[in-house]
Image (cartoon, rainbow, N blue to C red):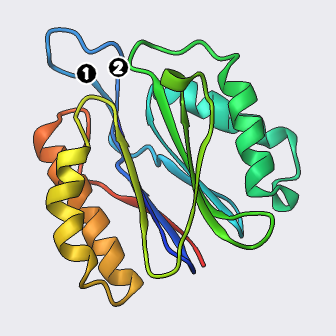
Amino acid sequence: MSAVLAVCGEAFCAMVGDGRMVEEPILDGKPKILTEDLPKVRKVNKNVVIGFAGDCLAAVQIINALEDYQTQYLTLEKIVKILAEKGRTVEIQPVGVRLLVGGRGRKGDFQLVTLGSAEAFQPQTQPARPGAYLIEGACSHTEIGPVLEQQVKPQAAQWRSLDDVAKTLDGCIAALAERDESVNAKCFRELIL
């Protein structure tokens, strides 16, 4: 139903998602497309960006829990806590929900957090390390690992700018769209510096 990818380095977090929303569950192997223009990444404030894959309606309900707060003051850690708590209360289609939360933590360090329905919204936090990139992705109906291996691994060593990172992430979304009819190649991007 969707795809989202994130890259965090020691000085940035970039996220890209596709725009297709399909009706779940997918029957007869052919997805019914509801829209081609649903952004699956959202900048919460100057420090945090969120992306999702899976049950779009459930994911939007979870993310909309942030509207009860003055988001400009929320830390990454508080946002993750709110999302995890809300996620445990929302009815979710069997396809599940996967959230990626990236950006600056309370101490100013870049982090990438994954949480989803398959793990009862138990957050998995990875801090950025000097000279390395954190790369995560989620796709509802296609294994994302092979795409990341084919697209990101050979290109990451040549990254010299954020445009290079964006080009690679867009290429991953395009590759997923070729393999999975629940994903389109329309990219929505957010960036935290």
- Which residue corresponds to mark 2? 23
Q: Amino acid at mark 2?
A: Glu
Front-most of residues 155 and 180:
155
Res 23 → quadrant:
top left
Disc with the residue nearer the chain's start (2 vs 1): 2
Q: Residue at x 24, y 55 (%)?
A: 148
Q: What count of labels does the image hold?
A: 2
Q: Position of residue 29 (x, y in %)?
A: 14, 16
Relative vertical location of residue 166 with respect to residue 179 in this rendering, above or below: below
In terms of secondary structure, where does tag 2 sit?
Answer: loop
Q: Residue at x 14, y 9 (%)?
A: 28
In terms of secondary structure, where does tag 1 sit?
Answer: loop
Q: Position of residue 9 (x, y in %)?
A: 50, 74
Are the residues flagged by discs 2 and 1 in contact, CB closer than 8 Å?
Answer: yes
Relative vertical location of residue 158 with respect to residue 55 in this rendering, above or below: below
Q: Residue at x 26, y 40 (%)?
A: 183
Relative horizontal placement of residue 25, taking residue 113 as reference (left or right): left
Front-most of residues 140 and 43:
140
Relative horizontal placement of residue 168, taking residue 98 as reference (left or right): left
Q: Position of residue 187 (x, y in %)?
A: 34, 58
- Which residue corresponds to mark 1? 32
Real-space Cα separation, disc 2 to disc 1, in angstroms: 6 Å
Q: Position of residue 171 (x, y in %)?
A: 21, 63
Q: Amino acid at mark 1?
A: Lys
